[in-house]
Image (tube, helix red, strand yellow):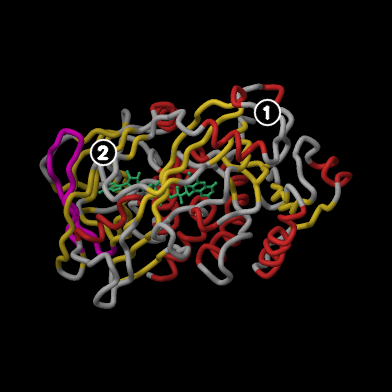
Amino acid sequence: MGECLLREGYRRRADSKQQTASSKGRQSREQNSGRWSVHCELFTVNSRTYAAPMDVDLAVIGAGVVGLAVAAELSRTRQVAVIERHGGYGLETSSHNSGVVHAGIYYSRGSLKHTLCIEGNALLYEWAAAHGVRARRIGKLIVAVDETELDALAEVAHHADENGVPDMRMLVGRAALDEMEPAVRAVAALWSGSTGVIDQAELFASYGASAEANGAWIALKHELTSVERRGGGFALGLVGPDGGETSITCDVLVNSAGLRADRVAAMLGYGLDGAGGTPPMRQTVNKGRYYDIVTPEKARLLRHLVYPVPDHGKGGLGVHVTIDVDGGVHLGPDTEWLDDGAELDYRADDSRRAAFNASASRYLPWIEPDDIAPGQVGYRPKLQRPGGPIADFLIWRDGGYVHLGGIESPGLTSSLAMARRVAEML
Ligand SMILES: Cc1cc2nc3c(=O)[nH]c(=O)nc-3n(C[C@H](O)[C@H](O)[C@H](O)COP(=O)(O)OP(=O)(O)OC[C@H]3O[C@@H](n4cnc5c(N)ncnc54)[C@H](O)[C@@H]3O)c2cc1C
């Protein structure tokens, strides 16, 4: 996988809400950090100087929404360090997504995606209310545009019912639809009242703040470059912002490296293809592009999230409408499988305008190519192969190592539930 070209808008947005770190004082020294008396290194985060532990109970690789949720949960009872290669939280997948608090409608019954999504949905709204994170339970409609889609819609409704998704109801006929979403072309729609949207940057900043308040140490601009098993635990080799090398040790290692989770597993010597008792951990990458509806009077026609009946074989939920917490209206994401090692370019591109317009105009008949402009781009880390069966999240423990693999959607929604699951495993 090549170097990431991060979308500047998101970098600025996330950076403005959080701190950036630079490490100082490369030599380890004996120092009292206040909570622990261990070998320390000094790190400066804005104007505060941290005495960073060189030996912790638990290290989390990755300060995305999942790694930070794990850190917030586990730092309540353990000494935790989070290692993040970028200068801010959540700069990869956690800030390049739809920000939807999913309801758990589509996932295979009993799967981690199903159970963690339903549990995570409730936990996320609770957390948002308690921590001042903006979230709106805006609701979503899955629409059948004509009679040929009614069976598929009924199947989605049946599946949602079996999954125990709360607050679902079928709307049939124009009168019911006009009341809810008059500008959408459909003959019937499935309403989900527990679906909503959340401010992703506020969410992961709140997880980070909670972890830090519990005494966790979050090392930004530090990349994990090697892992060695040592004395029942792990020695982690890190490269800091000035290229200097340092290392810390930990008893437990949680790999929450998102798109690079398989690379981190490989550092530990695991085969990635499921041989020798280890689960398959090799990830594929699936690109998702968005277009924004930029004609204000057209964007204002929409009141809820609107999804077509899904085609799971394509790796996503179909080009849908999301409305973010600021009221911005977006179409997408689409799906495109990338070749192994392809460069991840987060810059918006305008290569799919016609395809987006065609997909959206099935249920938004008034949309014109000039009403949309290219928006953000995100990358899904998947355990599914192109054309292969849908894969579940992988949460796998091997002694002191916990692997979080294939954390695509609904990973944001599931973040707190996933953190609890990791805590239960340890
Ligand atoms: C297009 C798209 C739309 C989505 N929409 C939704 C949605 O609406 N709702 C929902 O619930 N989910 C959604 N998701 C899924 C959700 O965004 C992810 O599941 C979630 O953000 C994953 O978080 P994470 O912490 O696992 O990964 P990431 O956010 O990718 O974090 C991993 C971190 O690990 C760091 N890292 C990697 N390797 C190293 C290393 N060697 N050393 C140090 N740091 C390292 C990275 O820099 C990164 O910051 C969507 C995903 C995509 C791509």
Residue 213 shows in this picture = no
Q: Residue furthest left?
A: 27
User: Mark 1 or 2 closer to N-term?
Assistant: 2
Q: Tag 2's secondary structure?
A: loop
Q: Quadrant of residue 303?
A: top right
Q: Tag 1's secondary structure?
A: helix
| Range drawn in magenta | 234-252
Residue drawn at x 51%, y 40% as measured from the top left: 200
Give the percent coordinates (x, y) of residue 239.
17, 43
Mark 2 burial class by Cα count in 10 Å: few <14, some 14-19, many 20+ = few
Instruction: Identify the residue under disc 1.
Output: 299
Q: Mark number for residue 3?
A: 2
Give the percent coordinates (x, y) of residue 210.
45, 47
Q: Is residue 70 above or below residue 19?
A: below
Residue drawn at x 45%, y 39% as measured from the top left: 95
Give the side of residue 213 with respect to residue 113, left or right. Answer: left
Give the percent coordinates (x, y) of residue 77.
40, 61
Q: Residue furthest right?
A: 175
Residue 237: say if magenta.
Answer: yes
Residue drawn at x 54%, y 32% as measured from the top left: 354
374 or 126, nearer to the observer: 374
Q: Mark number for residue 413?
A: none
Q: Is residue 261 above or below residue 397?
A: above
Q: Residue furthest front?
A: 148
Amino acid type, residue under disc 1 in the picture: Ala
